[in-house]
Image (spheres, rainbow, N blue to C red):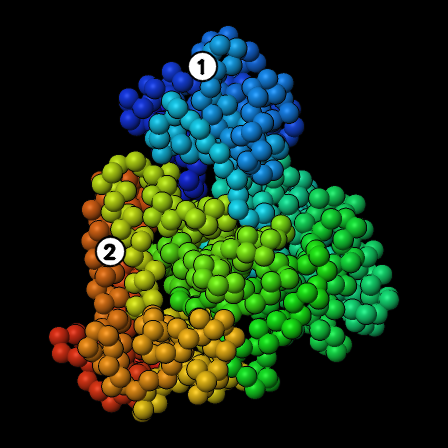
Amino acid sequence: MKKFFFLFVITVNLLAEDGSRLWLRYDKISNEQFLKSCTELIKTCFVDGKSETFSVIKDELNNGLSGLLNKNFEFTNRFEKNGVLYVGVSSSETIKEMNLESKLSHISDDGFLILSTKIKNKKAIVVTAKTDAGVLYGVFHFLRLLQTQQEISNLNVSSSPKINLRLLNHWDNLDRTSERGYAGFSIWDWHRLPDYIDQRYKDYARANASIGINGTVLTNVNANAFILTHDYLLKVAALAKIFRPYGIKVYLTARFSAPVEIGKLQTADPLNDDVKKWWKEKAEEIYKLVPDFGGFLVKANSEGQPGPQNYGRNHAEGANMLANAIKPFGGIIMWRAFVYDNNVPQDRHKQAYNEFKPLDGKFEDNVLVQVKNGAIDFQPREPFHPLFGAMPKTPLIMEFQITQEYLGQATHLVYLAPMFKECLDSDTYSKGKSSLVSKVVDGALDGKTLTGIAGVANTGTDKNWTGHLFGQSNWYAFGRLAWNHEFSSEQIADEWIRLTFSNDEALVKSVSKIMMQSRENTVSYMTPLGLHHLMGWDHHYGPAPWIKDKPRADWTSVYYHKADSNGIGFDRTSSGSNALVQYFPDVQKKFSSLQTCPEKYLLWFHHLSWNYKMKSGKTLWEEICYHYYNGVDELRKTRSEWNLIENKIDKERFEHVKMLLKIQEDEAVWWRNACVLYFQAFSKKEIPAGFEKPDNTLDYYMKLDFPYAPGI
Ligand code: GCW
């Protein structure tokens, strides 16, 4: 009896569905017919390589194929029978004999080929690439084909990433808190590094490699100079060693005042010789420990961070000094354009452009300027940043936020691919029609080869990595879009659902429906029609459109919505701040005119009367109410839709999401009531008939207080 109980406990533990396996589950293929054909086509596997990356490849194939095909998988080094999966770089003897030059000429260093073919007259599948990392990406892709049950009898896959630097940015502090992190603490256990290597580091690297992410900025942009001290660099080197076989480079944030704080210099002036020397020596020290160190990410002269302007120098002078220090070693500088100052009497929307546009062409060739998707700050919806297209001589890195600072944090299910795509697919008109943001970022528009995209990570110590299980889909989607921004949101959702849950068609349909409408819905119950920055003070949790009278006007809500008895919205046309002038003329024209400005951006660019007639025939006030109410209604439908899959997945993950959806509904109602009641105090109009009345007063909502909200 005791024995039985013991076995039972072990089995239960092994099957714990805590989400930790992410999209790399490798459970046995459920479709018998497909399983049979895979078993025929993959009898053995020939892993032709000896590097550390190849040992990762071998482990992954062993793990993946034994799980998916449900047998102990055997490796070979011969082509004796049909059914060999051959995995090797293009310079291997086997590939050289295959005459694949023409196909290989179409892929980049990180790209790969997967082909059904014959080797020594035996049926084989080949995964090959120019580099070890490329082979690793190909292997993950191949395993994904099996996981999502796609035909593998006649493969002819050729794939290359469109963007070279595909990075996660961790806003992680040395004390293991994570700024805007909602999934526990930072994964980096600095205190126990470099000697203690947590298994999570490998799991993290593996997950990233599986979606093509090839770099990680370990530390917060609100930087701590301490990371650049020797002891900490040893810890960084230990992480770099773990990540290297997975094709992942490490980067750090550089605090501009580090020469003063840890170097004992009197100044951090970028034109000062001692300062230059200090950074050169620091770079040398880093590269001795981490020969493939990626470079620095810098937030300067923004939100209190030190920078070149403290010494009367501009951003280019600051960036170039660091760029020169790191250039001999092949490193890069990613200099953030997220700058604004409440002492500058200008719409915050305009400040980054005003500072950076004149610097186009003034940066060293190893500097990239990192630009957030929109000009304010990761709002549920923002028009694209006017800097895209405006700096043709400078490589621009796109910065997206995967962690949901302004999108319900880790209690709301919001699939972000549609939001990322909305920005990437926007037309800047910088070189005429079809000058898409994606083409600025991938370098195609201005013939750039140094290209990058960064996502502010949502990972932490939570067992499921991201707090909300569906946060995983945003990490996944970011990686997939970084690889190829032409993938559709639906396609990525479909893939993720199959990998994470199952290939059951009804399940895929329900979950996809939930995901695909989730972001639009969130915009509806938070910030419809172009409203923005209505979130709680500092922690940004929940609604607080009433925030005013704070030390910085540009950190209040009233600065952004400008509601008064006449109307609502931020006038950014020529009669207002004229931020629109920063866009190219076609875009300007479109957004300036009330006839052509998409209603989703209406109050972002226009201040309009409560009675303004919308395209629907409703007044602006009614339309605002409609959106807030509709957002809640749709969420109620989402909850019912989720219940449909109850018997199709494990109880643990089902209940996890179910409980969070209940919280999300309650919070959506809170958003709706608080915002509608607050704006009603200005519009002085009734909530349209038929809508349920808020069950609390405005005063009640205004008094809610969350001193321990996460993420700060
Ligand atoms: O979104 C805001 C956040 C800050 C963040 C800043 C930035 C790291 O509220 O927490 O600081 O942007 O991007 O630098």
* Quadrant containing the N terminus in the rendered view: top left
User: Which residue, as the protein is rendered here, is positioned at the far left?
Assistant: 690
Q: Amino acid at mark 1?
A: Lys
Judging depth in this view, the residue of 281 and 351 nearest the camera is 351
Q: Tell me: 351 left or right of 280.
A: left
Question: Quick one: label 2 or label 1, which is nearer the N terminus?
Answer: 1
**239 in relation to 86, above or below:** below
Residue depicted at x 58% and y 73%: 352
Q: Which residue is mark 2?
A: 638
Among the 4 quarters of the image, the one containing residue 301: bottom right
Residue depicted at x 34% and y 39%: 498
Judging depth in this view, the residue of 61 and 648 nearest the camera is 61
Residue depicted at x 33% and y 79%: 594
Q: Tell me: 35 left or right of 160.
A: left
Give neighbour class at mark 2: few <14, some 14-19, many 20+ (Cα, 10 Å): many
Q: Which residue is mark 1?
A: 123
The answer to whether residue 55 of the structure is visible from this angle is: no
